Amino acid sequence: MKSSKHKFTLGGFVAPSIISLNSSNTKGRFDGDISQLGLALGGGINYTYKSISFILIPVGFDFGLNSQAKDWIYHKKYWLGFGIGIDAILLSF
């Protein structure tokens, strides 16, 4: 029996992140730069053929976790992402 080299997967993620706040991304509410904890949430579709993966993230949101980070202009904003992955075996590692 021959196995398929095509694979589709669906998944979700929750990832902590560091948000750099400054006057340009908080509409002037902060002078200088400060870093705060954030959270990214989303879901994606992955297609893999042999050793190469193509990832589409049609649903993603970023959240600031404290009162300062909630002034971030991207707080609760929708985003879209994509990626390409190459298996290390393909690169002979």
Image (cartoon, rainbow, N blue to C red):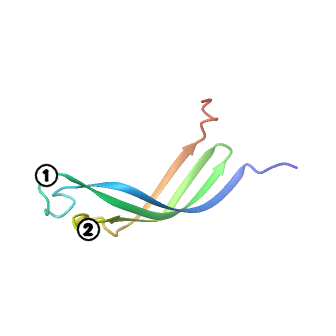
Identify the residue at image location x=27%, y=66%: 66
Residue 76 placement (x, y as % from top left): 34, 70
Question: Disc 1 and disc 2: Cα gap in Å?
Answer: 17 Å
The quadrant of the picture occupied by the C terminus is top right
Displayed quadrant of residue 24: bottom left
Which of the pair 7/31 is nearer the observer?
Answer: 31
Q: Position of residue 2 (x, y in %)?
A: 84, 48
Identify the residue at horizontal 23%, vertical 68% (top origin).
67
The label number, if any, that marks residue 32 in the structure image: 1
Instruction: Work out whether residue 48 or residue 36 is closer to the camera in this orientation and state it.
Output: 36
| Mark 2 secondary-structure assignment | helix
Q: Does residue 62 sit above or below 88 in this rendering?
A: below
Marks 1 & 2, CB-CB < 8 Å contact: no
Tell me the residue at 63%/59% (across/down): 9
- What's the amino acid at mark 2? Lys
Q: Pointer 2: what residue?
A: 70
> Which of the 4 image quarters holds residue 16?
bottom left
Left or right, residue 69 beside residue 84: left
5 left or right of 52 in image:
right
Question: Position of 55 compared to 15: left or right?
Answer: right
Q: Residues within 10 Å of mark 1 (few under 14, many from 20)?
A: few
Give the SS element for disc 1. loop
Q: Is residue 34 above or below residue 58?
A: above
Farthest residue toward the top?
A: 92
Residue 16, label in figure: none
Count neighbours of disc 2 (C-alpha within 10 A) and say few if under 14, some if 14 to 19, many if 20 or more: some
**Percent x, y of residue 26:** 19, 63
The number of callouts visible is 2
